[in-house]
Image (cartoon, grey):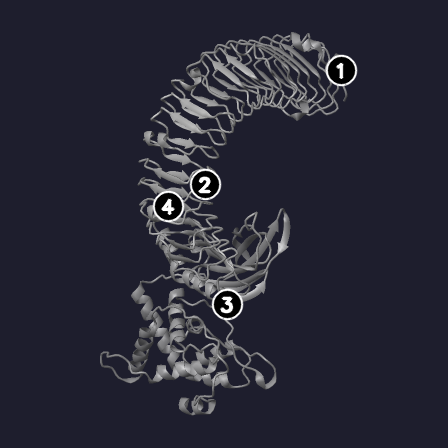
Amino acid sequence: MTCISVFLLQNLVNLKEIDLRESIYLTDIPDLSKAKILELVNLYGCKSLHQLHPSISSLSKLKYLDLSYCSRIRSLDIRSKYLSRLYLYGYGNSCLTNISVASDELTNLDLDTMRKLECLNVNSRSLVDLSLDKCFSLKEISVVSEEITKLSLSDTVISSFSSISSLPKIRYLDLSDCKKIEKLDLHSKSLIELNLSGCSSLKEISMASEEVTELTLSDTAITSLPSSISSLPKLRYLDLSDCKQIEKLDLHSKSLIELDLSGCSSLKEISVASVELTKLSLSDTAITSFSCISSLPKLRYFNLRDCKEIKILDLHSKYLIDLDLSGCSSLKEISMASEKITELSLSNTAITSFSSISSLPNLRYLFLCDCKEIEILDLHSKSLIELDLNGCLSLKEISMIPEEITKLNLSECRNMVSLPELPCALHDLDAFNCISLEREITQRVVLQHMLQKSIPYLHQQQQHHPPKGVVRFVFPGDRVIDDCVFQIAKHSMSIHDFKMSHLSGFIYCFILKENIDYKMLVSIYQDGELLWDSEYTLFNRFPIFSTPISKHMGFWYHDISKFDRENEVYDDSRDVEIKFQLKGSFWGEKHDNILHGLHPLFGESDPHDAMRDIVAGVVARMILVLPVFLIVLLKEDREEPMAVYSCVSTLDADVSCGAFSFFLRSLPFGFNRRGDGKKKRWQWQLSARHPPPSTPLLQLQIADHLRSTYPDYHLTKQQTLFRFVHEALQADPPSAPESSGRNSTIAKKARTCEGAMRPCPLPPRKKLCRPPRTPFTRRRWSRSLT
């Protein structure tokens, strides 16, 4: 249908509404003069409609007219007394060049982005809001309305404002990016907000209103402020940023709260009379003297970024909480007396002494990026929670890290040889391009810190507060150490027959080979039904201006301790299957990535003493069955480690598979047939089928005991296990109540092993040559065990 039949409409005298929206083939509208009571005409999206019949102007009852996205209409003349809604939205109205509207009821008119509109005439005594943003061709505007309060003409080419300069009730006027304005006189006394930002030709301005509270003159050509503006009694916000011609500024307004002079590169002197000023920005200015700051008792935010002439700074503002001195490359000394400051940025400065900073009691965020003179950092601020040392190329040592710190950035600290002692609260460490760090030691320190400090601390804090951030560590590395329980090399992995009880989460270990985003997709199934899945961002791309020098390791902790409590379908009496998939992407392009390690963690559900008794009982049972286990293990016809468990479990029904798995996992080695011919040797392959009912800390305690007692365990695996069992059987137990029989022996051995389970640091592994032959040969052990 290209047009509407005259026969259909000419006699419809009772017609009230016409809705022809998105009639894309409609080209013409017939004469509607006889539709005397027509109130609504909807022609939204009629892209082929090129003109409106003049009769529309005579529709005295018309209230609603929608011509949005009618892209071929060139001229519009609407004269309807009761028209209250006129819609001309969308880039589709690009052909409109002339608009004339007369209505007593029209209150809002939005004509944004009409790029070809040249002339506008609006006559509406009820018009309150008129928006003409980005009407690039608009040259002439006439507005007749005594009620208009808001007018926006940003990014237009208008240079004359005779028709709007005296609007009696105008309160908000936006003339931003009107490049042709050179001089502006505003006579309205009701003006509250004026935006002239980006009027690069504006040199003079005058206003009659004393009600102005917000004035934006950024990126203009003014050289000074007239007294009528600098003394505005109600002015609260003044933006003069990037006014590069201003050299001296005197502000007499006593109500000013926020002042922005950033980018005024010629500004050398400033005077502020307001004692209410709370925020001041002087970044990238030529100011060197700050005597006026002492007269600002309520100053809270002070920005001096890129003030390259400052060498010494002495600040004594009592209420200051945020100070930015980044980029002050000549600054060597700073003295501060503010006890309330919480955030301080000294990036890219020449400061080497931090004595005055360490005395700040409430400092929480400290940024020292690109401070290339710092070699040793000694901080004693107890409240610090975030420290950024990115780009401190000369930094070799951090003597002490505050106990409350949660985030530490050591990126590009290329001379740092070792990590300092990491506090419990630290859960986010970025050591990007710290190429001097010893990789294996760093990885072991980080893993031990996550297991013994940061993750337990995080769970403890979550009992009283909502979780804050994630546990994430990034540092140079190209392989996963043996301490990680499950070492794999796949982009996806599934764990079958898994017990979720007491599980707190997983540590993911991955190698950052490409500068892309890394995400982990985790799905949990039970009986083939998807119970829960979620995607987490493990790591975002490296900094834009940084290039990875080597491969990097990423450790990321995923807390799923609340899964069983939040999932109503989950049955904790049955096993589940967990699938992990590591994905990478960059600008929409997908990358296959390799997950190199997975470390399950189990939380405590019993008090400490009860858990210790449980572990002691498990160890006691293991002592009884381990001799049999070793005899079966040494037989050549055993191919599967789980077959060993089957033989052991038949001898002692009390030894559960979970307890057996716990004990073997507590040892940092295991058994599996590898090699060819006579050189086959046993190594234990850990399985996730039966997770141990214990905490990671208890596992580490047993492993640490073996490490401290037998530092060569990783080279003489079988002999170490023999020696451990032999000493466990022969050790003298501590004093205990008298008992007799087999149960007494079990209790004594349990207490002996329990006393050995105490936390101790992980020593670095020693690289030894082939161990010498010892008396602990297979033959002697066979005799002693029998």
Three-letter code for the amino acid on which mark 3 is drawn: Ile
Residue matched to label 2 = 328
Q: Which mark is residue 364?
A: 4
Residue matched to label 3 = 481
Please give left or right for residue 296 compared with residue 102 in the image: left
**Could you tell me which residue is drawn at 32 percent across and 76 percent down?**
750
Residue 573 in sight: no
Three-letter code for the amino acid on which mark 1 is drawn: Ser
Rendered view: 743 above or below 589: below
Whether tag 1 and tag 2 are in contact, CB under 8 A, the answer is no
- Marks 4 and 2 sit apart, C-alpha to C-alpha, by 21 Å
Residue 512 location in percent, x, y? 56, 57
Disc nearest the viewer among 4 and 2: 2
Three-letter code for the amino acid on which mark 2 is drawn: Cys
Dot 3 crowding, Cα within 10 Å, few <14, some 14–19, many 20+:
some
Q: Quadrant of the N terminus?
A: top right
Q: Nearer the viewer, residue 570 or 339?
A: 339
Rendered view: 497 above or below 233: below
Disc nearest the viewer among 3 and 2: 2
Secondary structure under tag 1 reads loop
Disc nearest the viewer among 1 and 2: 2
Secondary structure under tag 3 reads loop
- Marks 1 and 2 sit apart, C-alpha to C-alpha, by 76 Å
Q: Which mark is residue 5?
A: 1
